[in-house]
Amino acid sequence: MMKTKVLVLLAVAGLASGCENMSTGQKGAVAGAALGTGIGLATGGSFGAVVGAGLIGGAAGYIGGSMLGNK
């Protein structure tokens, strides 16, 4: 289980480091998906719950980032 968590954290770090040419909404989506997935993993959810948390976090992050980018 620890190996899986480390691999996920490395993948998130790789995705976050490639955000230079992204819009504010896209950056929010990446951050929200990472946060949602991390929370799903930390609570010990099943695979479906972790993926669902990542998708919901990504959608919420995109909406929030787009709203901030338009102001």
Image (cartoon, helix red, strand yellow):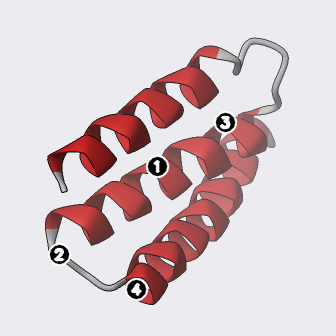
Task: Looking at the image, tell me whether mark 1 or mark 2 is earlier in sequence order.
Answer: 1
SS for callout 2: loop
Nearer to us of marks 3 and 4 is 4
The residue under the point 58% across, 56% down is: 61
The residue under the point 55% across, 76% down is: 56
What's the amino acid at mark 4?
A: Ala
The spot of residue 4 in percent (x, y) is: 31, 49
Q: Quadrant of residue 28?
A: top right
Nearer to us of marks 1 and 3 is 1
SS for callout 4: helix
- Which residue carries the number 2 mark? 44
Q: Residues within 10 Å of mark 3 (few under 14, many from 20)?
A: many
Tell me if 22 is positioned left or right of 1 in this view. right
SS for callout 3: helix
- As measured in the structure, the alpha-carbon distance from the residue carrying label 1 to the one carrying label 2 is 15 Å
Q: Nearer the viewer, residue 66 or 70?
A: 66
Task: Looking at the image, tell me whether mark 1 or mark 4 is earlier in sequence order.
Answer: 1
The residue under the point 51% across, 34% down is: 11
Nearer to us of marks 1 and 4 is 4
Q: Nearer the viewer, residue 59 or 38?
A: 38
- As measured in the structure, the alpha-carbon distance from the residue carrying label 2 to the one carrying label 3 is 26 Å
- Which residue carries the number 4 mark? 49
Screen quadrant of the C terminus: top right
- Which residue carries the number 1 mark? 34
- As measured in the structure, the alpha-carbon distance from the residue carrying label 4 to the one carrying label 2 is 9 Å
Q: Is residue 26 above or below residue 49?
A: above
